[in-house]
Amino acid sequence: MEWLFAVVVGVLTATGLYLSLRPRSFDVVLGLTLLSYAVNLFIFGMGRLRAGSPPLIRDGVTHYADPLPPALVLTAIVIGFAMTALLLALAVRNRFARRHDRVDDEGGL
């Protein structure tokens, strides 16, 4: 389970980095979104990957899950949606202002 989780986080990170370095604005937005998903999964995984564990400490329970990482992930998801909406609005505005969506061209065509 942990290997599969690590591979998924690694693939999301690698794909996000690759897309973030592309010259088109939509690729950059998609890459940053995939990077935020990878970070969310990483934070979620820090709270232990145990199925059926209670999230709170009680008397007699020795294996419990940490409730803080899921709360951080929920906050990060909301912030990620807001940042994706902002980046898409900026990319669309840039597309109509410059007549192309390349982020590496300073002069424009």
Image: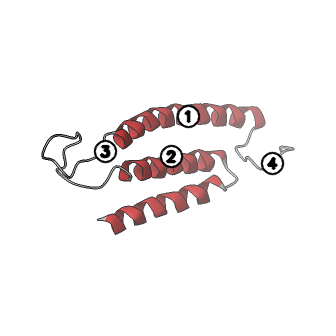
- The picture places residue 77, in percent across and down from the top left corner, at 43, 37
Which kind of residue does numbered mark 4 sit on?
A: Asp
- The picture places residue 51, in percent across and down from the top left corner, at 20, 53
Secondary element type, mark 4: loop
Q: Residues within 10 Å of mark 2 (few under 14, many from 20)?
A: many
Q: Which residue is mark 2?
A: 36
**Within the image, what quadrant is residue 21 found in?**
bottom right
Q: Which residue is mark 3?
A: 66
Pick the residue in front: 91 or 108: 91
The residue depicted at 35 percent of the width and 68 percent of the height is: 3
The residue depicted at 64 percent of the width and 34 percent of the height is: 92
Q: Which residue is mark 4?
A: 105
**Within the image, what quadrant is residue 91 found in?**
top right
Q: Seen from this angle, which residue lies furthest left? A: 60
Which kind of residue does numbered mark 1 sit on?
A: Met
Q: Which residue is mark 1?
A: 83
Quadrant, the N terminus: bottom left
- The picture places residue 96, in percent across and down from the top left corner, at 71, 33
**What is the distance, in whole Å, between disc 3 and disc 1 at their CAs?**
27 Å
Q: Nearer the viewer, mark 3 or mark 1?
A: 3
Question: Nearer the N terminus, badge 3 or badge 1?
Answer: 3
Q: Seen from this angle, which residue lies furthest bottom? A: 3
The residue depicted at 75 percent of the width and 32 percent of the height is: 97
